[in-house]
Image: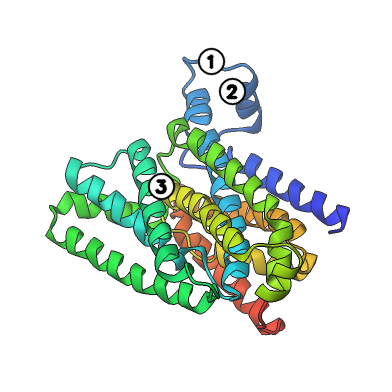
């Protein structure tokens, strides 16, 4: 990967994050923002807004985007499907069902509690899919995808049954989360998300060489020293951690995990080390830009990041798909 391109991507992400601190229902000048960061005054409303709302929101956008980008890159190699999305393994559906059960049981949505409930649901969903579709001698990716699709249908059906029969306010709170939003996320959600994204991202990069070998085919990869069963298990665990964290923290966000690896692969080629690192950068940039665009278009209402990511990522992916041959990895 050219160093100039890498530093350019990093600079773009940093500038987008900085701009996000200024924009919102209440405009805050760069000078006030800088003062809030360097010389915080608890009695200043603008300082509280920057520190307690906008700063964690900016970092969470970066975490969510990076997690989805890395999960998408691993997912597309694991399934040998260039159209694979991290939600394909039933992870998003598992997280959604767990959070709906939490809302229905408590009658309200607690962002901090929903994070852990979502991660638990994502883990159960991903583990179930792997047990149903991945525990075979041949490690057929088609079997894994079919198991994920089938489980997702079952879990989403259960989710609809719960929401339809729940009280109106439960459905309203779930609907707000299901769109995909970063609003109201504070430090209690950010810190676990940072650590889980860091662990998952490092684990994904550590799998780069085995994934390179596995991408050549299971027989050839095994001759190079990569144990397909261990690689599949480790890769599935990485996807569960990354996608589960992103979904639990911000709700389902589409196209980022699909488009980011495609854009990265077009630049870096098939090497997974460079591919995953750039996928994380591109994913972070896409979510940050989507969140910033939603606040710029309507500062008062703040269009949810899930809607904006689909509006931005969809056309990017369509344009890329028209230029590139949709071949296997």
In the rendered view, would you say 106 is above or below 277?
Answer: above
| Numbered mark located on residue 41 in the image | 1
What x and y, as percent, mark residue 148?
41, 70
SS for dot 2: helix
The residue indicated by pointer 2 is 36
SS for dot 3: helix
Determine the residue positioned at 84% across, 59% down.
Answer: 1
In the rendered view, would you say 82 is above or below 290?
Answer: below
Q: Residues within 10 Å of mark 1 (few under 14, many from 20)?
A: few
Find the distance from the CA under tag 3 to the CA under tag 2: 33 Å
Quadrant in which the C terminus appears: bottom right
Q: Residues within 10 Å of mark 3 (few under 14, many from 20)?
A: many
Displayed quadrant of residue 230:
bottom right
Tell me: 38 left or right of 97.
right
Q: Are marks 3 and 2 in contact (CB under 8 Å)?
A: no
SS for dot 1: loop
What x and y, as percent, mark residue 240?
48, 54
Q: Viewer-proximal residue, 285 or 19?
A: 285
Find the distance from the CA under tag 1 to the CA under tag 3: 35 Å
Q: Earlier in the sequence, mark 1 or mark 2?
A: 2
Displayed quadrant of residue 20:
top right
Q: Earlier in the sequence, mark 3 or mark 2?
A: 2
The residue indicated by pointer 3 is 119
What x and y, as percent, mark residue 157?
25, 68
Determine the residue positioned at 62% across, 24% down.
Answer: 37
Looking at the image, can residue 3 be seen? yes
């Amino acid at each position: 990967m050219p160093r100039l391109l890498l530093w350019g991507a990093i600079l773009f992400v940093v500038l987008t994050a900085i701009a996000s601190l200024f924009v919102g229902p209440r405009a805050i000048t760069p000078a006030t923002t800088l003062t809030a960061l360097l010389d915080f005054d608890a009695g200043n409303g603008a300082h509280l807004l920057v520190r307690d709302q906008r700063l964690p929101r900016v970092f969470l956008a970066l975490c969510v985007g990076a997690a989805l980008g890395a999960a998408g890159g691993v997912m597309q190699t694991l399934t040998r499907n260039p159209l694979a999305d991290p939600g394909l393994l039933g992870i998003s559906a598992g997280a959604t069902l767990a959070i709906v059960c939490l809302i229905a049981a408590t009658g309200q949505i607690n962002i901090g509690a929903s994070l852990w409930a979502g991660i638990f649901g994502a883990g159960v969903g991903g583990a179930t899919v792997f047990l149903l579709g991945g525990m075979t001698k041949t490690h057929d990716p088609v079997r894994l995808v079919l198991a994920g699709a089938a489980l997702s249908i079952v879990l989403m059906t259960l989710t609809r049954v719960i929401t339809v029969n729940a009280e109106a306010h439960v459905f309203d709170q779930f609907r707000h989360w299901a769109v995909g939003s970063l609003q109201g996320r504070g430090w209690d959600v950010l810190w676990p998300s940072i650590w889980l994204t860091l662990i998952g991202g490092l684990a994904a990069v550590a799998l780069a060489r085995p994934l390179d070998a596995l991408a050549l085919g299971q027989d050839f990869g095994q001759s190079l020293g990569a144990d397909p069963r261990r690689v599949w298990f480790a890769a599935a665990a990485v996807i569960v951690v990354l996608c589960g964290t992103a979904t639990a923290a911000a709700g389902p966000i589409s196209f980022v995990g699909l488009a980011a690896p495609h854009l990265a692969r077009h630049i870096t080629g098939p090497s997974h080390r460079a591919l995953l690192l750039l996928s994380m950068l591109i994913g972070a940039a896409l979510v940050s830009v989507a969140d910033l665009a939603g606040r710029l278009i309507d500062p008062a209402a703040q269009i949810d990041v899930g809607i904006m990511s689909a509006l931005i990522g969809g056309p990017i992916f369509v344009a890329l798909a028209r230029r590139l041959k949709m071949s296997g990895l």
